[in-house]
Image (tube, rainbow, N blue to C red):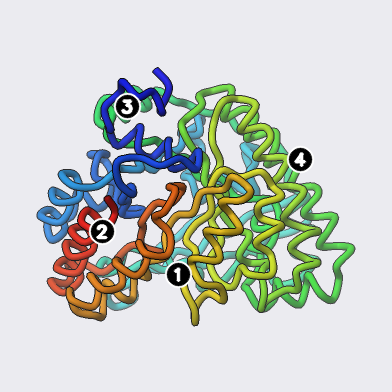
């Protein structure tokens, strides 16, 4: 049955699909970003301090289960699949304890010489810090690209479990990086900017080479299974103030459009993830044909008010997700959160095409009582003001 059939009840799945199509439902959908209440293997569902909040999220919000098909090979961990290739490159790894942290050093033996990266984790924080990137120069980039490309293979055997746990309570979303982002991630942010500006022809060749890999892997992933929605990540690296709009137009738009076209051809939806100051590239984002845009931060972290984002996106058939900043949920009072949710709804709920969502998710362990209280206030206010 179509998501907008008048005879169908308003499930979370129907509500989210309606928003993606820029339609209006019984209320504004409420999503908690990466806190996926309906996936038993999700990190948040396995942290004791988050348990009560996740129960509340399951009961009152519209779930997006973040899930990607696994690489069918067990040769590498996810982090060790080098430059989107399944080629069996030799990677040495060692981990050392440094106080409360674990630091992992990897050495990749490429045909043109060794590369090294260092990452660090802390049991009290749900993130990974990249202490040292694979590449420190264009010569290192050439070493990385000397590793032959072998297309990825995928295994969707876990998808029936995901569908069974989710039911009609939401959508399944996979995440994929755009080619320019994969190139940028080879270096530290400052080194990447120098590379892109000082040796643009070399950077362009690398992006083009990675684009072929991204598209082939995306085809194979879609051959394996098609989920409801695909989040394309990375364009924020090329938005102002880091780069002028011309660089966004050159390195992001054509490749993302190609990805979106393929996703649409296979029956999926696409949402573009772009933090920061998007005002000068917003029309370009719409030009890619995406179905949704997140997280649409308000000023001063963003540079455009939500009402204007909604107006410009809605005219192009692009739904808007987000606008509730995580720092508000971590630092303010429930009364301030309630007032902000009301303001957001006044700007964006009319005519549909909007999903209320935080711009990020908490990563501290244990969960702060203040953050938990504010999440409950945000959800309750969303239910009240989003009708």
Q: Please name the residue that numbered disc 4 is placed on.
A: 212
304 over 58 or under it: above or below = below
Using the numbered discs, state the Cα–Cα distance from disc 1 to disc 4 in whole angstroms.
28 Å
The residue carrying pointer 3 sits among few (fewer than 14), some (14 to 19) or many (20 or more) residues within 10 Å by Cα, namely: some
The residue carrying pointer 1 sits among few (fewer than 14), some (14 to 19) or many (20 or more) residues within 10 Å by Cα, namely: few
Q: Please name the residue that numbered disc 1 is placed on.
A: 129
Q: Nearer the viewer, mark 3 or mark 2?
A: 2
Element type at marker 3?
A: helix
The residue carrying pointer 4 sits among few (fewer than 14), some (14 to 19) or many (20 or more) residues within 10 Å by Cα, namely: few
Which residue in the rendered view is the most extreme toward the right? 201
Q: Earlier in the sequence, mark 3 or mark 4?
A: 3
Q: Position of residue 205 (x, y in %)?
A: 85, 55
Q: Please name the residue that numbered disc 3 is placed on.
A: 163
Q: Which mark is residue 152?
A: none
Using the numbered discs, state the Cα–Cα distance from disc 4 to disc 2 in whole angstroms.
45 Å
Quadrant of the drawing holding the N terminus? top left
Assess whether mark 2 and mark 3 are in contact (beta carbons under 8 angstroms): no
Q: Position of residue 100 (x, y in %)?
A: 27, 74
Whether residue 117 is visible here, answered yes or no, is: yes
- Please identify the quarter of the rendering in which residue 149 is found: top right
Element type at marker 1?
A: strand
Q: Earlier in the sequence, mark 1 or mark 2?
A: 1
Assess whether mark 4 and mark 1 are in contact (beta carbons under 8 angstroms): no
Q: Which mark is residue 385?
A: 2
The residue shown at (35%, 61%) is 345
């Amino acid at each position: 049955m179509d998501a907008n059939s008048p005879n169908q009840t308003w499930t979370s799945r129907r509500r989210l699909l309606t928003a993606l199509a820029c339609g209006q439902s019984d209320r504004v959908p409420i999503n908690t970003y990466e806190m996926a209440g309906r996936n038993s293997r999700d990190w948040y569902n396995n942290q004791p301090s988050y348990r009560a909040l996740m129960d509340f999220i399951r009961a009152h919000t519209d779930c997006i289960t973040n899930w990607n098909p696994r690489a069918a090979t067990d040769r590498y961990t996810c982090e060790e699949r080098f430059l989107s290739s399944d080629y069996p490159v030799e990677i040495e790894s060692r981990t050392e304890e440094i106080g409360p942290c674990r630091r992992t050093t990897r050495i990749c033996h490429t045909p043109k010489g060794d590369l090294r990266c260092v990452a660090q984790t802390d049991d009290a924080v749900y993130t990974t810090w990249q202490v040292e990137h694979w590449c420190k120069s264009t010569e290192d980039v050439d070493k990385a690209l000397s590793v032959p490309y072998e297309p990825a293979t995928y295994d969707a055997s876990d998808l029936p479990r995901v569908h069974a746990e989710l039911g009609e309570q939401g959508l399944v979303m996979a995440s994929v990086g755009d080619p320019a982002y994969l190139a940028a991630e080879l270096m530290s942010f400052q080194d990447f900017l120098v590379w892109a500006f000082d040796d643009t022809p070399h950077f362009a060749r690398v992006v083009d080479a990675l684009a072929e890999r991204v598209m082939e892997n995306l085809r194979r992933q879609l051959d394996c299974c098609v989920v409801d929605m695909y989040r394309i990540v990375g364009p924020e690296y090329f938005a102002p103030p880091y780069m002028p709009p011309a660089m966004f137009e050159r390195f992001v738009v054509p490749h993302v459009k190609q990805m979106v076209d393929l996703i649409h051809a296979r029956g999926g939806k696409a949402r573009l993830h772009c933090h920061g100051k998007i005002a000068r590239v917003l029309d370009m984002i719409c030009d890619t044909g995406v179905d949704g845009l997140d997280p649409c931060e308000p000023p001063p972290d963003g540079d455009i008010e939500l009402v204007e984002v909604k107006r410009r996106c809605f005219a192009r058939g692009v739904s808007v997700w987000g606008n509730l900043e995580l720092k508000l949920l971590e630092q303010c009072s429930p009364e301030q959160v309630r007032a902000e949710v009301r303001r957001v709804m006044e700007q964006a709920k009319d005519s549909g095409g909007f999903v209320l969502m935080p711009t990020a998710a908490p990563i501290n362990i244990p969960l702060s009582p203040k953050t938990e209280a504010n999440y409950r206030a945000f959800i309750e206010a969303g239910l009240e003001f989003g009708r």
